[in-house]
């Protein structure tokens, strides 16, 4: 069941109408000003990518990402952190580092689920 969007010619506000069929509403009325002079507009849409697609498009983990929005995706932050610690020879699961990195591991796990990590000072 689609949602049709219209722009009011009088007040210039966008109005959305949920419709139970695939035909646009016959006589839509602006909920803000009550005008019936509305023009249909093109609605935005979402495009979802899999984690695999995100990683393939961002290149190898060792490369510096070219996309400035790369680190806006928390999954990439977690991925880079794990890669960097591994490059430095740090095994977060070893007994030597277990207590030191417990907060970091939780933050990486949260990032993999899409949650932005807390600032580093909050983890220490």
Image: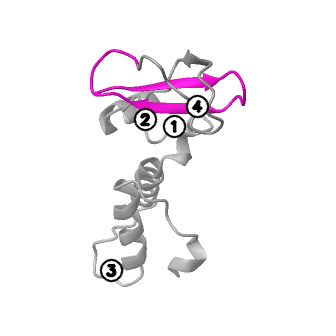
* Quarter holding residue 101: bottom left
Q: Position of residue 50 (x, y in %)?
A: 31, 35
Which secondary structure lies at badge 3?
Answer: loop
Task: Name the residue at 42% across, 81% down.
Answer: 100
Q: Which mark is residue 98?
A: 3
Nearest the camera: 59 or 97?
Answer: 59
Task: Give the extent of the magenta segment.
Answer: 1-24
Q: Earlier in the sequence, mark 1 or mark 4?
A: 4
| Residue 40 visible, this orientation | yes
| Residue at the spot of label 1 | 63
- Decide: is 112 above or below 53: below
| Residue at the spot of label 2 | 60
Quadrant position of the N terminus in the picture? top left
Q: Which mark is residue 110?
A: none
Q: CA distance from mark 4 to mark 3?
A: 59 Å
| Residue at the spot of label 4 | 30
- Decide: is 94 above or below 8: below
Which secondary structure lies at badge 2?
Answer: loop
Residue 46 colored magenta? Answer: no
- Mark 1 touching mark 3, by CB under 8 A? no
Between circles 1 and 4, the one closer to the viewer is 4
- Mark 4 touching mark 3, by CB under 8 A? no
* Quarter holding residue 120: bottom right
- Mark 4 touching mark 2, by CB under 8 A? no
- Mark 1 touching mark 2, by CB under 8 A? yes
């Amino acid at each position: 069941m689609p949602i049709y969007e219209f722009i009011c010619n009088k007040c210039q506000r966008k109005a959305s109408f949920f419709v139970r069929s695939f035909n646009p509403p016959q006589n839509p009325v602006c909920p803000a000003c009550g005008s019936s002079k509305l023009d249909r507009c093109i609605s935005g849409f979402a495009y979802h990518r899999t984690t695999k697609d995100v990683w393939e498009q961002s290149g190898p983990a060792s490369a510096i990402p070219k996309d400035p929005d790369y680190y806006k995706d928390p999954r990439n932050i977690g991925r880079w952190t794990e890669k960097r610690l591994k490059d430095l020879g740090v095994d977060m699961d070893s007994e030597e580092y277990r207590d030191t990195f417990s907060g970091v591991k939780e933050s990486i796990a949260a990032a993999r689920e899409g949650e932005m990590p807390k600032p580093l000072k909050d983890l220490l």
